[in-house]
Amino acid sequence: MIVSEYFGLNVFNKAQMQARLPKEIYDQVIYAEKNGGGISNECADIVAKAMMDWAMERGATHYTHWFLPLTGITAEKHDAFISAPDLMGKTIEKLTGKQLIRGESDASSFPSGGLRATHYARGYTAWDMTSPAFVKEMSCGTILCIPTLFFSYHGEALDNKTPLLRSMDALSQQALRIVRLFGDRDAKKIIPSVGAEQEYFIVDREKYLKRRDLIYTGRTLFGAPAPKGQELEDQYFGVIRERVGRFMADLNTELWRMGIAATTQHNEVAPGQHELAPIHCTCNVAVDHNQLTMETMKRVAGKHDLVCLLHEKPFEGVNGSGKHNNWSISTDTGKNLLNPGETPNNNLQFLLVLSCIIKAVDCHADLLRVSSACAGNDQRLGADEAPPAIISIFLGKQLEDVVQQIVLNGTAADCLTDGQLDTGVSTLPVIKRDAADRNRTSPFAFTGNKFEFRMVGSSDCIANSNTVLNTIVAEAFCEAADVLEKSCNVATETKKLIAENLRDHSRVIFSGNGYSAQWIEEAAQRGLPNLSSMVSSIPSLTTEKSVRLFGQFGVYTKAELESRSEILYETYAKVKCIEAKTMLHMASKHYIPSVVRYSTRLADSVCKVRSACPEADITVQQELLKKTCALLRRANDALAVLEKSVENSNGVECLREMANYCHDVIAPAMRALRQPIDQLELIVDKDIWPVPTYGDLMFEV
């Protein structure tokens, strides 16, 4: 079947609404979606009935309020459409407007960071009209999913979606002030759009089930490098393996049916690593789509006896997985505010927008860093095509040259041209070259008409990063508009403001190698923050500056920021404790007993050879036995240290102190245990080694 014939088949989109709703009801829904204010109860009943009928035609028996709690994944509770049986024992299918618009969930069972006590359980879900309903076809049945927000009894946001929508409103309001200054009276809204490139690993399910670390933590806590990794650079864009290709084909079909425009698929740099990229869409819809994509990847992989690993660093020593967040802003009439045009030096509106974004990133680099903070990202950031923890901006030669001219002279007289690329092949035409190259080591890079925030982890919810990005840019726009709206000569004052922004904040612009040690030193001299770990970045959420920023634009209250800070500390500590306990289990139950068996085999060999041939040279066996026993001793000693570290953590009550204890004490103890066991893997016979190796996992799919 042609893709266009079934794309969005499982989505209750505008076309479905228009076909199924009376015109006046459809118009009321569209108006409320664009302008807010909700719809009447009578209208909600009609919409709910039409939505239910459509879903039942798709095979749905249940509905759910689908939301994004602070776990980083999605949540859903399924309710059947059936009503209570009548006296004759008959029932009817029913979905009311009230059920559509509002639901109730046990808020105390989700992370709240102190916003909700366990004995105060009420939480509400509310229909998010800006994101279309859809059906999911699962083993438990076909479910109508209604995207919703999740908040407490007193209105605090308990999800990742509510602050995101608030930030989009803030950005739109302030950006409209900017475009009005340049004569745009047609635009009614400014819309941030996002395309999230999703990286992931695929492994065989049978091998996965033999690795407790993958099952419990999503990453390998032990593992020696395979003889071949990514050194030959032959994985990237290589031919997709047949089994993985079948998985990708089924994945695409399911995503397309749910209206997710997945367009690009390819092998990534590491063996067993792949990437999927969608077409950009409105920011909040992109968040929903990315969450659905991750869910669908896992589910479809299972149908092929495969497992999709979304951890940022499932294998040590090869590329980790990220989620490149491509962000742009456009008017509702289709004008991209980040389009530099042919001569960006003369594009005053673009230069103002660019200078405001540079200012925002420089002023709030710490918030961008914490917005991408998760325990898995600590293993990934800083190498293998992952950006460093230091936030910088890459603009490319053309824009960097324009910026330098403005910084030096107050204006840019000209700009570098795109140029042409002559390949020297007679049968090829001369190719137009882009004005800028790409820098894969940059956390925040301009890529033509958008910025690519490369720091987000592969398992993370992109709502947090986009909430921060929208808000900090809204602040910069607000400050610019405050100045320019009072000006008698907007053009002159705009040029002055652009130059001021760039002079004050160009320290964040960097086009060199972000992996180099020299950059770390240079960044420190520039005064750029280097928040190298998740734990060190969390305090940024609750500084006076952050509380003032988010409060000014109504994105987070102080209590909501404090709650998210607590959740991050708690999550990091829990993740590290689970990893540590998994290491203790695997080392004591799997690795050490296997090494003991191997050393016994070696000892038996020494004794048998000596008995059979006293004059034989058994030096090799003896040295191997000594080396094995020495590493076994190191492993056992490290096991005892880690065990004691975990035991001592029970006395740490403060979440912040616990997270720091895990980072400073438990994590180093984990690394110390891993080292001798990884060395033993290269010595012990394969028939004795208790788990699949890196080579087994990454190459045998």
Image (cartoon, rainbow, N blue to C red):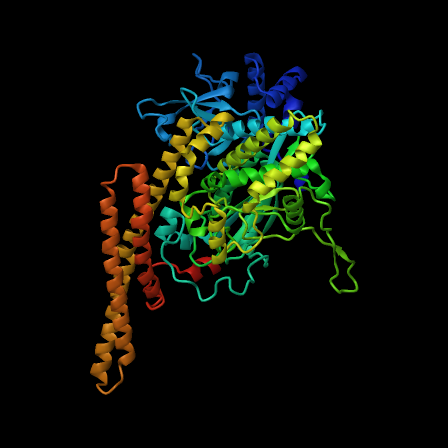
Q: How far across and down, in percent of the image, does residue 14 sit? A: 64, 27
Residue 470 x %, y %: 55, 33
Q: Which of 557 and 261 is in front in this view?
A: 557
The vertical placement of 401 against 551, above or below, is below
Give the side of residue 289 with respect to residue 114, left or right: right
Q: Residue at x 77, y 58 (%)?
A: 430
Left or right for 286, reference 348: left
Residue at image x 43%, y 12%? 87
Residue 191 at least partly seen: yes
Q: Quadrant of the N terminus?
A: top right
Q: Residue 666 location, x and y as percent?
A: 30, 49
Q: Which residue is drawn at 51% across and 29% down?
A: 145
Q: Horizontally, is 692 left or right of 489 in the view?
A: left
Q: Which residue lies furthest to the bottom in this view?
A: 615
Residue 58, image quadrant: top right
Examine the rendering and report whether any part of residue 334 can be seen. no
Count the marks. 0
Q: Where is residue 370 in the image (x, y as percent from the top left)?
A: 45, 40
Q: Which of 309 and 426 is in front in this view?
A: 426
Residue 594's image quarter?
bottom left
State the residue in front, 499 or 216.
499
In the rendered view, would you say 639 is above or below 662?
A: below
